[in-house]
Amino acid sequence: MSSQADTIAALQSLQKISAISKKRGDRAIFVTSSVIEALAHLRSRSSDSIEQAQRAIATARSFQLEEVTSEIPQVLLLVCVIDLACSLTIANISQLKTQLDTLKTMLDQTSGNNNPSETGSFLIPINSRAGSETSNLGGSNIVIAGTDGRLYLKFSWLPSADIYSLACFLSGVTWTHQTSSGHQAERFLREGLTRIAESTTTVCRNPTSLPTLSSQFLWRKSLECHMKIHFILILSLRTEWNSARKLIQELKTIVDAIGPSLSPSIHSFFLYIGGVIYQGNGELENALAVFENPVLREISSGNYGDSMFRCLNDLSTLSAMNSALILRDPAHPEHARWGPLLSSLDPICSNHPNKNIQIAYNLIRASPHTDDENISTVKQKVFLTRALNGAKEVANTQLTCITINFMRFKFFNKTVGEQAEKSSLAGLTQAKKLGDRLWVSVAGGMMASTLEVQGKPDEAQRAIEESLRIAARNPPLLQREMEEECDVP
């Protein structure tokens, strides 16, 4: 785990390499250096890290049509992976489909190339031919002389099987943004998990050292954990809690077996999604205990490298936001912490590079539990407008659904008129699109209430019966809460 100082030093070295290789006409070295620079920026915690990474990727791509790049397909594949990762990091939804198609095309092209190997090693040509200086290389495994008389730099990345597993994971994450229910994402994640299982049990046909095999095994198990974490979040999005619990037990088996060898982010994610499942089932005290666990909330920048710190810091922010949703209830014994907690989140969330966190924060700010709390209707509308516009911009169906339904509850509750009916219908439509039973039942109850005050008792009765039928499939604690608080006539 590199420190920020190490990252800065590495970037300076890479920029010097780029300058020298460009001057020497070493196009392949220049492109490779630019790609590694992009990767370093992506892992950095600087405020403009994504912008800098995208700039380095653009530099690398400026030579993509030159003949020499045909010799380095793995580098071009890495370009696609980093480009997609940048967009996912900042929720740049408009680019995801194109970037995923580009990655797939590059994978198809690479699969027909003999360069990708089981070991993951590949060669970068140097603009110099082997000569008397080659003898100075001794037993170097980094600079080697090729059979064609040229010199090459030897790199190692991922074996071909692992590249496909990684592509399945990235496809799953991308499709979660592209579709509401997550079924397409689920298909890719299942395929990725199958590939990992196959690669873990397949005997490598090439001689490989024990440390390399151990490293590959740990990488695959780490990717398997990340896939299962994302899978659990998709199931939670659809309120399929039994399936989510089953999968978290599978994840626990891996975490317990491998333990400290796994990255801190996996341990923190494992803890966080456990809290999500508690909260989704109405077990709020258990959820709060998880979200306020020091592992999630007390992140010291000095203990982690740049990329790990950024990941853990975002999880800490999400945990604080989940805590805020629990503490907002005036009946909660620790409700007094609600205001200070929101204030502490403001500088972090207001301009967060990930738009989804900005949107969720605006939604929380707009939703005090009671009308007598210190927020005006004008301010509420400002926060809700920001949340709704942002959710639509990044195509986040869940946040769009919650925002529209909250707007209906706040501004059209027991209101007569066409706009009230349209608002209720929009909320119900979004909830069904999301596939979340809880929000379908809540939105259905509000639809029934609207139809009742509109003087449509038969339609209202059908709507409430449908809402109650769906609500009966929610966890028992949520059913009781809905009976007490849901707007059902």
Image: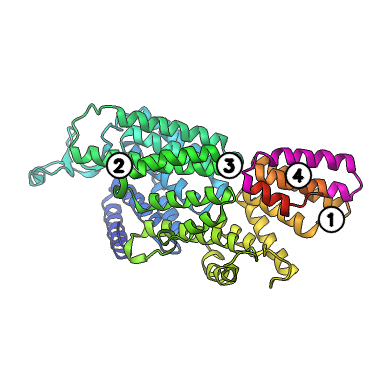
Q: Is residue 85 left or right of residue 21?
A: right
Q: Which residues are magenta?
A: 450-477
What kind of element bears circle 3? helix
The x and y percentages for residue 106 are 42, 35
- Check disc 3: other Cα within 10 Å, few if <14, some if 14-19, many if 20+: many
Quarter placement of the N terminus = bottom left
Q: Name the residue beneath numbered marker 3.
A: 178
Q: Residue at x 84, y 43 (%)?
A: 460
Q: Which residue position is annotated with label 4? A: 444
Is 3 in front, or is 453?
453
Left or right side of 30 for 412: right
Q: Amino acid at mark 1?
A: Lys
Looking at marks 1 and 2 on the same chain, the residue that comes earlier in the sequence is marked by: 2
Q: Check disc 4 and give the amino acid type.
A: Gly
Provide the secondary structure element on which disc 1 rests.
loop
What distance separates the C-alpha of mark 3 from that of mark 1? 35 Å
From the image, tell me which residue sits under label 1. Answer: 414
The residues bearing labels 1 and 2 have C-alpha atoms spaced at a distance of 57 Å
Q: Nearer the viewer, mark 2 or mark 3?
A: 2
State the CA–CA distance, disc 1 to disc 4.
14 Å
Residue 161: x %, y % from top left: 34, 32
Q: Secondary structure at mark 2?
A: helix
> Alpha carbon of mark 2 to alpha carbon of mark 3: how far?
30 Å
Mark 2 is surrounded, within 10 Å at the Cα level, by few (under 14), some (14 to 19) or many (20 or more) other residues, namely some
Identify the mark nearer the N-term, 1 or 4.
Answer: 1
